[in-house]
Amino acid sequence: MALLWRVLKVQSGVTQWVTACSQLTPLLLSQRQWLQTSSGIFQKIKIAALRMYTSCVEKTDFEEFFLRCQMPDTFNSWFLITLLHVWMCLVRMKQEGRSGNYMCRIIVHFMWEDVEQRGRVMGVNSYILKKNMLIMTNSFYAGILGYDEGILSDDHGLAAAIWRTFFNQKCEDPRQLELLVEYVRKQMQYLDSMNGEELLLTGEVTWRPLVEKNPQSVLKPNFPTYNDEGL
């Protein structure tokens, strides 16, 4: 009798364990599907982040900045102009919650990869490049902080941030500061007019001209059509 009781008890335990596992199976499948979906979404955001960074370096008229801001055509000037545009993208995408913050990290990652690659292509000594990368990293985060404070301030505050970071405290022409303040304000207005979900999918950004022929022509841009893979 005692033996029969133990057998029945074991069988009961096995039945309960099987029942519990059967209840867990849909949950595990659901979690797996969620992970696969999340992985796909983040992969699309990575592609969009690369496009957005590429927009900063390929759709910006660097020659016009060199000319109108009296900047030398150097690697450092290129970096300062790129930094300004990357920062504006970061400000916009931070408004898109967790996905936007993730995209910001990827944009910055691509930026540093590009900076390092450009330095190598230019033949910069590895030791000098590493040293310059450290200097630029410090300048980047200091510049981001200064621009963040400036954009939340009035035009005087923004002009001060641009003078410190973009011009490295060496601008003596107030018209150049005025030009950059106007550019940042209208560009941020333009970026804010873009749909956040479309930016997360496409990463496509166009930049207003440094000198606007029609200052009132800040219009919502038309986005290209992409397939499900964001391509």
Image (tube, rainbow, N blue to C red):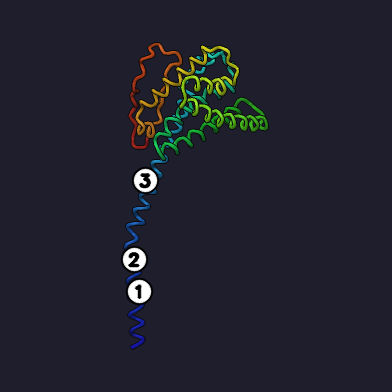
**Considering the numbered disc 2 on the image, is that residue within a helix, a strand or a loop?**
helix
Looking at the image, is mark 1 or mark 3 earlier in the sequence?
1
Residue 124 position within the rendered picture, expressed as x and y whole percent measured from the top left: 64, 27
Residue 186 position within the rendered picture, expressed as x and y whole percent measured from the top left: 41, 20
Against 39, residue 65 (above or below) is above
- State the mark number for residue 227: none
Decide: few, some or many residues near mark 2? Use Cα within 10 Å; few <14, some 14-19, many ≥20: few
The three-letter amino acid code for the residue at tag 2 is Ala
The three-letter amino acid code for the residue at tag 3 is Thr
Left or right of 29 on screen, residue 130: right
- Circle 2 residue: 20
Q: Residue at x 55, y 21 (%)?
A: 166
For the N terminus, give its image quadrant: bottom left
Residue 161 position within the rendered picture, expressed as x and y whole percent measured from the top left: 53, 23
Q: Nearer the viewer, mark 1 or mark 3?
A: 1
* Count of picture labels: 3
For the C terminus, give its image quadrant: top left
Q: Is residue 1 visible?
A: yes
Left or right of 24 on screen, residue 102: right
The CA distance from mark 1 to mark 3 is 36 Å
- Circle 1 residue: 13
Residue 152 position within the rendered picture, expressed as x and y whole percent measured from the top left: 46, 27
- State the mark number for residue 37: 3
Looking at the image, is mark 2 or mark 3 earlier in the sequence?
2
Q: Residue at x 35, y 50 (%)?
A: 33
Q: Residue at x 40, y 28 (%)?
A: 204
Q: Is residue 231 visible?
A: no
Against 28, residue 134 (above or below) is above
